[in-house]
Image (spheres, rainbow, N blue to C red):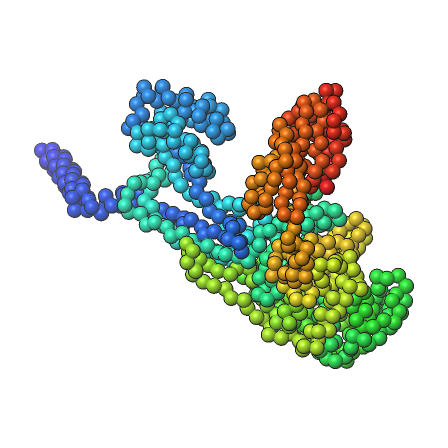
Amino acid sequence: MDKRKDILWRIYLVYVVMGIFSVLIVYRIFHIQIAEGEMWRARAEEISTQQIKVQANRGNILASDESFLAVSVPVYDLRMDTRAEGITQELFNKEIDSLAIALSELFKDKPASEYKEIIRKGRKEKNRYLLLQRNVTAMQLDKVKKFPLFRMGKNKGGMIAEQKSKRVKPYGNLAARTIGKEDGESKGTGLEKAYDEYLRGEEGLRLMEKLSGNVWRPLDTENTVDPVDGYDVYTTIDPRIQDVAESELERQLSMHNAGYGCVALMEVSTGDIKAIANLKRAENGRYYESYNYMIGEASDPGSTFKLATMIALLEDGLVKLEDKVETGNGEMRFFNHTLTDSKKGGHGTITVQHAFEVSSNIAMAKLVFNNYKNDPQKFVEHLKKLHLDRPLGLEIPGEATPRIKNKNDKDWSGLTLPMMSIGYESLVTPIQILTLYNAIANNGRMMKPRFVKEIRNRGTIIKTFSPIVLEEKICSEKTLRDCRTILEGVVENGTATNLKNSVYKIAGKTGTAVIANNNKGYRSPSGKIYRASFCGYFPADNPKYTCIVVVNAPSNNVYYGNVVAGPIFRAVADKVYASAFDINQNYYVERKDQFTNRIPQCKAGYITDLKTVLNKLNISSETKNTSTEGIVYAVSTQSYVELHGKEIRNKIMPDVKGMGARDAIYLLEKIGLQVRMKGKGVVRYQSIEPGTPISQIAEVVIELS
């Protein structure tokens, strides 16, 4: 009996404990649902929805003429709500084939069968955010909106277009390295990186819903903070000059099979960089922008550095331009090193001015060594005043750190002083040399290179970057006059006479340096590696622009600065001079009689085109007769242009001499001939004489000049 009571007692105890436990569970459920319900529902909402950052439209980068160098354009991710309310199964089956075909024909990346399978699978999986295509353009999207199903709209047809922005360079690779890439990709260079704080704008917030597969879909809700677009950056770059600089640089690099090169053009009075190009040879022989050598590479500058040497000598009153210096037979021993001049047999005894003009290494090294050997630091201090020992502080990241040795440096030797005088044992960037020459052109005032003028927000100026003066006067007026004299002399009588022209004067200095090949010294397996350069300004009598060109490792046995770098300088200078009235107006004023009261010569062509042009120029014309094809040739008189018809006969070779290429080719192809063209300009020669029957002739060659 006692045993039975004991068992029952234990059973009752278990029941009681289970009952209490059940009550606690019920209580806890009730408490969670009622008392803590709001908190947990909010927590669940936070897990399934989240505020996602929305990138702002990045600001534009513009050229000096306000054309776009880099711009953000809208692109779209095309998605589909396969379970949109308007898509019944019957409608889906009816339109799926047409939709797949339309997508395939537009994007041309997948066959229609693959698009169909993707959409079918998405509908089967009840995917309400099915990705169909990324980076759809606005023009493509307009077409997509007319596709089957999608034409029904977002809610009924299921089309979802999610906008984002894509960075585009309208000029392609023009100044690509200077413009750079967006933050995170620029690797420390470019205006995109330098002005990111202005360009990037302010991020917005969008409420997104988390779907399976960790995919987030935007929700239509008012709980969205709109992003604020970035500001626009207005640069100093001139696209026309930039294009000439890059094309000429590429042409010369290719001609000389060079490793890489760079060119920059600076406005004298402001320091504005109007063009800057950097090209490197790829394995396939093509050239591309890979690194900003102009600001990012500090190396031995070579003979362009001799301007700094002359400034030191002239400032200390140690030489005069008419002083004589003995250079001997072109060889001179400094300690354990033999220094040579490029002229075989040497220059003999010459003036200091002519020594600079012909770039005598012996003369420069001898003058500096003899005058500063007892106090070499005095020479070094002159170089420091010229800002050659420190970065210019450019806003574009990646500026190299230059080096000018000091007397107390561990690697200073007896040879250092004479070698520094001719541009060796020093590390200087090309843009530093450009800045120095620009100071001479600017009456001694050294300007910091400027790449950006303004920051604007929808046309309103937010910030202006004024020109910055690094040194108000780098040397005395007398030294300035002497420096300008010897720089002009280089082109008139020295190593750069090939740049001389009758229209405007150029002043500058050539440079040809042997450069070190990493740890292999100054020789490569195939011989010495050279760097050719030219730095100067124009017009020499009233300087407006300064330009530097550097070509590294020309390998076709031509490596002198006047031949390799000089033609690039000349091409850029010619382009600028021809298009800038403020620097060539004197030329036209002196020759105004040649350009006034003259009726221009006209090419032969179509009468309607010629009359349109003449009317625009307010030039009278008189039609004597016309051909059946409307082809005329023009005769300019003192007061008007006579238009005479050209005879055009069927199956007879017409006379196309004097016509432009477009009109000539059109006319010849119209009568059934294939045309091979040589040259450009006006047709001067045709391989088939006018009046020749052409029934048995298939091709004609025309030469233009």
Nearer to me, 568 or 302: 568
Report whether residue 117 is seen.
no
Residue 499: % across, % down: 75, 58
Q: Say which residue appears at 63% left-offset and 35% top-offset.
A: 624
Q: Say which residue appears at 38% left-offset and 31% top-offset.
A: 145
Quarter of the image for the N terminus: give it: top left
The correct choice, above or below, for 77 with respect to 536 in the image is: above
The correct choice, above or below, for 140 with respect to 529 in the image is: above
Q: Say which residue appears at 65% left-offset and 42% top-offset.
A: 602
Q: Say which residue appears at 33% left-offset and 42% top-offset.
A: 208
Residue 320: % across, % down: 78, 77
Nearer to me, 80 or 26: 80
Q: In the shown orientation, is residue 467 left or right of residue 93?
A: right
Residue 582: image quadrant is bottom right
Nearer to me, 405 or 370: 370
Residue 20: % across, % down: 14, 41
Quarter of the image for the C terminus: give it: top right
Nearer to me, 381 or 9: 381
Report whether residue 595 is seen.
yes
Residue 469: image quadrant is bottom right
The mark total stands at 0
Residue 516: image quadrant is bottom right
